[in-house]
Image (cartoon, rainbow, N blue to C red):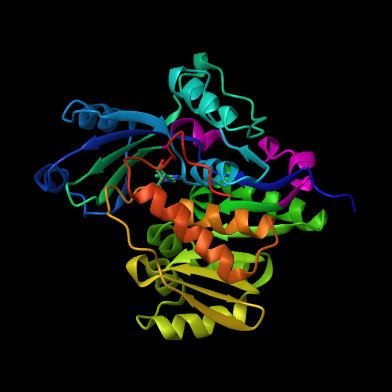
């Protein structure tokens, strides 16, 4: 088998982030739990946007954030996801391609009337983010959008659990996992959010036990997967199911279970400005480390470094100067 052209292929919901600093009262008024993610329709997106002072519009989407940070850290990266040929879609595409990421996905025609997805990210003074996502064009991502040649040419295919939430995207997700296995490549999965785990627990168990080589999750998602409240119990269960599990625990650091060993890696202390994309960046640092054949602890440290960089600024994407290697 020849060496793959890309270290990493990320597949996910292609989203533009609309960032705004707000007070807790606005989030309470919208009826959302602090730190949560709510799916919304287009009119609700417009209604929320009319009530906030938008600070910045950037490329977003969990898997795309991972792709961008990994590329900044020297990995060769491809990305697949669905945008529309509208202003937001052009913005997303430009952001991705400027990083040298291969992005071959065909946009939906603007005339179809389904806009590019957007995520309104409301950030409180404490740096906590609450998200409202309108999925738009992402719901049109189908198995035909998963190019066999791109999957076969990536050492690792990284899939968002978020994708599992829409029927067509779910088929695309499963198709991608099958193609990666057929080409003898690795499959990585991030559980994405506790609401995804609650809705797709059985399917995620099957994936974790049978089709996934590397599992990424935060502590809450892991507890939700195994329906337990004790972290150690969840660790025991995930160790029995997967070859490599990478669990982030916020300020408690990360736990990596692989090669039959458990490694507890403390986090680096940083001043929190905005936690949006911290998990995406951690996965990126870890995967960039794997692509350079680093050991698991070094990979986790690179994950910490990348997450630390993202947390100390607004938004989920790195600054121009961000080039960790
Ligand atoms: C299916 N949903 C709701 C989503 C997302 C999402 N990415 C994929 N699917 N909802 C929010 N995001 C992205 O999460 C990032 C922070 O981790 C936002 O675009 C934000 O950049």
Which of the 4 image quarters holds residue 118?
A: top left
Position of residue 139 measured from the top left corner of the image (x, y, whole percent) = 50, 37
Q: Quadrant of ligand 1?
A: top left
Identify the image quadrant of the N terminus.
bottom right
Q: How many marks?
A: 0
User: Camera-side residue: 207 or 7?
Assistant: 7
Instruction: Pick out the residue farthest to the right.
Output: 1
Vertical comparison of 77 with 108: above or below = below
Furthest-top residue in this view? 111
Res 223 → quadrant: bottom left
Compared with 45, 283 (above or below) is: below
At x 59%, y 28%, the residue is 97
The magenta segment: 135-155
State left or right for residue 31 relative to residue 118: left
Q: Is residue 152 magenta?
A: yes
Give the residue furthest to the left. Answer: 25
Horizontal side of 161 relative to 6 (left or right) equals: left
x then y, percent, for residue 244 = 62, 71
The quarter of the picture where residue 194 lies is bottom left
Q: Main secondary structure of the magenta part?
A: helix
Q: 40 or 67, which is in the foreground?
A: 67
Residue drawn 33% across the image and 67% down it: 251
Confirm whether residue 277 shows in the render: no
The answer to whether one can see residue 253 in this image is: yes
Q: Position of residue 3 (x, y in %)?
A: 84, 50
């Amino acid at each position: 088998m020849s060496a793959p052209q890309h270290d990493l292929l990320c597949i996910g919901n292609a989203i533009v982030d609309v960032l705004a600093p707000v007070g807790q009262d606005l989030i309470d008024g919208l009826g959302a739990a602090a730190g949560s993610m709510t799916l919304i329709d287009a009119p609700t997106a417009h209604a929320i946007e009319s009530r906030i002072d938008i600070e910045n519009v950037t490329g977003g989407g969990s898997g795309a954030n991972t792709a961008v940070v990994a590329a900044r850290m020297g990995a060769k990266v491809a990305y697949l996801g669905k945008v529309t040929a509208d202003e937001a879609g052009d913005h997303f595409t430009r952001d991705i391609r400027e990083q040298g990421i291969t992005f071959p996905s065909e946009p939906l025609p603007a005339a179809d009337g389904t806009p590019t997805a957007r995520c309104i990210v409301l950030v409180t003074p404490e740096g906590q983010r609450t998200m409202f996502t309108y999925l738009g064009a992402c719901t049109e991502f189908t198995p035909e959008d998963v190019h066999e040649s791109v999957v076969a040419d990536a050492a690792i295919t990284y899939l968002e659990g978020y994708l599992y939430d829409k029927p067509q995207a779910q088929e695309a997700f499963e198709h991608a996992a099958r193609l990666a296995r057929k080409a003898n490549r690795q499959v990585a999965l991030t559980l994405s959010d506790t609401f995804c785990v609650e809705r797709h627990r059985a399917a995620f168990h099957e994936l974790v036990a049978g089709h996934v080589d590397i599992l990424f999750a935060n502590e809450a998602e892991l507890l939700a997967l195994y329906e337990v409240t004790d972290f150690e119990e969840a660790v025991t269960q995930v160790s029995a199911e997967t070859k490599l599990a990478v669990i982030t625990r916020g300020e408690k650091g990360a736990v990596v279970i692989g090669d039959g060993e458990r490694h507890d890696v403390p986090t680096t202390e940083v001043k929190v400005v905005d936690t949006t994309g911290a998990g995406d960046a951690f996965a990126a640092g870890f995967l960039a480390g794997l692509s350079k054949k680093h050991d698991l602890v070094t990979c986790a440290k690179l994950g910490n470094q990348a997450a630390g960089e993202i947390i100390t600024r607004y938004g989920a994407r790195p600054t121009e100067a961000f080039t960790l290697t």
